[in-house]
Amino acid sequence: VNCKGTEREGTPSETVHHIEEIRLAWDKRLDNDNLIPLCEECHKEIHKRYRKGKQYKQDEQNRLRILLQENK
């Protein structure tokens, strides 16, 4: 499966990212609508954005949900 992030789209994915973190949304830990395959570089970049603040995190989660839907 290839990375669905935008930084290195097409690179083989190395991890599955939980759009809503499992520590905050345990019930969504296996929900396909909450999981997106990413390469390690995209995964690191997304977590950097999450740490910028609540609005950045919400914006990034929305962007990831859109990417996920576009790639179904």
Image (spheres, grey):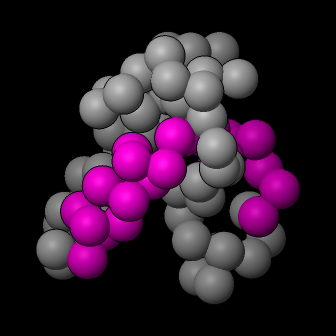
Q: Is residue 19 above or below residue 65?
A: below
In terms of secondary structure, what is the magenta stretch mainly?
A: helix
Picture residue at 53% right of the left edge, 29% below the top = 3
- Residue 20 x/y as whole percent: 54, 64
Picture residue at 36% right of the left edge, 66% below the top = 47
- Residue 34 x/y as whole percent: 64, 49
Residue 58, visible in the rendered structure? no
Q: Is residue 2 above or below residue 7?
A: above
Q: Give the residues in magenta.
A: 29-51
| In-image side of 20 versus 56 (left or right) | right
Q: Residue furthest right?
A: 30
Picture residue at 29% right of the left edge, 32% below the top = 7
| In-image side of 53 versus 21 (left or right) | left
For the C terminus, give its image quadrant: top right
Viewer-side residue, 11 vs 38 = 11
Picture residue at 18% right of the left edge, 67% below the top = 55
Residue 5, visible in the rendered structure? yes
For the N terminus, give its image quadrant: top right
Q: Quadrant of residue 48?
A: bottom left
- Residue 46 x/y as whole percent: 34, 56
Q: Is residue 8 above or below residue 61?
A: above
